[in-house]
Image (tube, grey):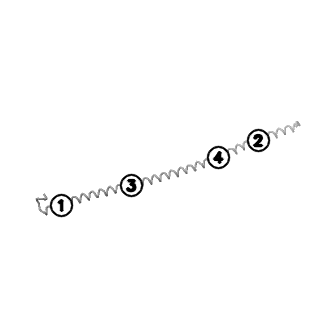
Amino acid sequence: MLLKGGLLDTLLLLRALGSLIALLLLGVLLLVVLALTLLLLSVLLLVALALTLLLSLLLLLRGLLLLLRVLLLLRGLLLLLRVLLLLRGLLLLLRVLLLLLRVLLLLLRVLLLRGLF
């Protein structure tokens, strides 16, 4: 076709081919831009996911520390309760000793009244 036609036909053919090649190159460029945009969005999504995971881990660690503080507080309260129960037991022991002392005093009075002592 290039050999049979004139110079104008050849120029028109090259112009048509050039327009087609230009459209193809524009399509490839748009595909590359789209692929790069999607890649950038996926990287941003991964960064957001990693930051969310890090924040979740920090919140979990903070919750565990709070739980540890509560457990230590409960341990202190249990120790205080043990001390109070020990003091209550000592108080009951003192009451029993006081009752025994009263019984001994009553026996001594009885013995004194009877003149046996």
Task: Indicate the amino acid at tag 1.
Answer: Leu
Disc 3 is placed on an element classified as helix
Mark toward the start of the polypeptide (3 vs 1): 1
Give the x, y percent position of residue 37.
34, 57
Give the x, y percent position of residue 75.
61, 47
Q: Which residue is mark 4?
A: 79
Q: Which residue is mark 1?
A: 14
Disc 2 is placed on an element classified as helix
Q: Residue at x 12, y 59 (%)?
A: 3
Q: Nearer the viewer, residue 59 or 97?
A: 59
Give the x, y percent position of residue 100.
78, 39
Q: Which residue is mark 2?
A: 97
Mark toward the start of the polypeptide (3 vs 2): 3
Mark toward the start of the polypeptide (4 vs 3): 3
Residue 43 image label: 3
Disc 4 is placed on an element classified as helix
Q: From this viewpoint, which residue is outermost toward the right?
A: 115
Distance Cα–Cα, label 3 vs label 2: 80 Å
Give the x, y percent position of residue 45.
39, 54
> Alpha-carbon neighbours of circle 1 within 10 Å: few (<14), some, or many (≥20)?
few
Task: Indicate the amino acid at tag 4.
Answer: Leu
Mark toward the start of the polypeptide (2 vs 1): 1
Q: What quarter of the picture does the C terminus occupy?
A: top right
